[in-house]
Image (tube, rainbow, N blue to C red):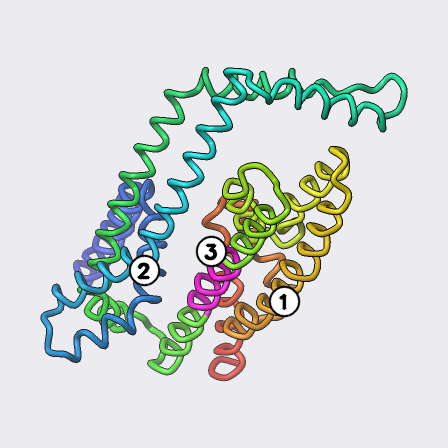
Amino acid sequence: MQQKVMEKYFFFGLLFATLVFAFFIFRPFWIILMLGASISIILYPVYTWLNKKYLPNWLAAFLTLFFFIIVLCIPLFSIGTIVFNQSQNLYHSVVNGGNITPFLSSLGNKINYFLPNGVSLNINEIVSSFVSFLTNNIATIFSATMSALFSFVLLLLAIFYFLKDGDGWKKAILQLSPLSITADQKILDRLTQTINGVIKGYLLIAFIQGTLMGVGLYIFHIPNPAIWGVIAGIASIIPPFGTAVVSIPAVIFLFITGHMGLGIGLLAWAVLVVGAGDNVLNPYIVGHKINIPPFLILFSVLGGIALLGPVGILIGPLTVSLLYTLTDIYQNEFK
């Protein structure tokens, strides 16, 4: 009897030590694994449809991954190429002078005209400092780009294996879980709904708002509209700021440079088209799928970003959604 107790304690001690060691091994890649699992859940209906065509698991997973690359990645790379070209043009305009220096001086003088006495803003100095920062950190930027490409390749591999072997891993986890089958299924269903709501909702809203803002900036003659459209799309994910991070400075820029009509038009576009689209789409796409009050969605996203960075956009609502599900299970099965 004592021998059995010793064996049990030794086994659980060894299991705990192994889990801790495995956690530190996978720690650099847990964000990639989390994103891979989440995207594979989004793509799972496509994989299931292909699997029903009597295709092998590996081929169905490969074709689903190919579909993901064609539908999502190629447009993103195309937009990235446009943004890169506009960034290059902006960089060369600043470095080589051209018509940008007189323009910046004029813009600085007009801004300083509205500032209180004793307060001044040197636009040329700010832009020069920014360009100097880019020049001095070009090696770091290149290294970060290569790291992002490597992470993207790992993400594609993770999506492939989650699609191919995900069913088997899911069954193994359910067998190890001490909860009832109903409780396990409720947790999985709620997390699946949350992942679909957050990824589909936020990505779709960010894409729509970024596109609308980019189109508006192009119509009302704001330089480099693709760059600012991408920034607006990213900012739309952060609820308190949204696309106003781009639209307000753009409107002020048009007013200061004397284009009052264009500024009023852009302001109307930002409020009536871009802003109204956010108010309509956000509660319907995100809140409807997640089934969590918008107030909690807002703070879960902000808290997730503050704690974990960009991936917190997904982890925050997932955590709150899991808490909702566990509370429901407690009320129905344990209380």
Q: Is residue 330 left or right of residue 172?
A: right
| Residue type highlighted by circle 3 | Ile
Q: Is residue 140 left or right of residue 172?
A: right
**Of tags 2 and 1, which is closer to the observer?**
2
Q: Where the N terminus falls, by quadrant?
A: bottom left
Q: Is residue 263 magenta?
A: no
Label placed on residue 294: 1
Mark 2 or mark 1: whose residue is earlier in sequence:
2
Q: Is residue 57 above or below residue 128?
A: below
Q: Residue at x 60, y 51 (%)?
A: 216
Residues tagged 3 and 2 counted as in contact (Cβ below 8 A): no
**Which residue in the rendered view is the most extreme toward the right?**
117
Mark 3 or mark 2: whose residue is earlier in sequence:
2
Q: CA distance from mark 2 to mark 1?
A: 30 Å
Secondary structure of the residue carrying numbered label 3: helix
Q: CA distance from mark 1 to mark 3?
A: 16 Å
Residue nearest the viewer, comparing 13 with 188: 188
Residue nearest the viewer, comparing 75 with 160: 75
Give the x, y percent position of residue 230.
51, 45
Give the x, y percent position of residue 330.
50, 77
Give the x, y percent position of residue 24.
31, 41
**Of tags 3 and 2, which is closer to the observer?**
2
Q: Residue at x 85, y 28 (%)?
A: 114
Q: Which residues are magenta?
A: 194-207
Residue nearest the viewer, comparing 156 with 315: 156
On the image, numbered disc 3 is attached to which residue? 315
On the image, numbered disc 2 is attached to which residue? 71
Secondary structure of the residue carrying numbered label 1: helix
Secondary structure of the residue carrying numbered label 2: helix
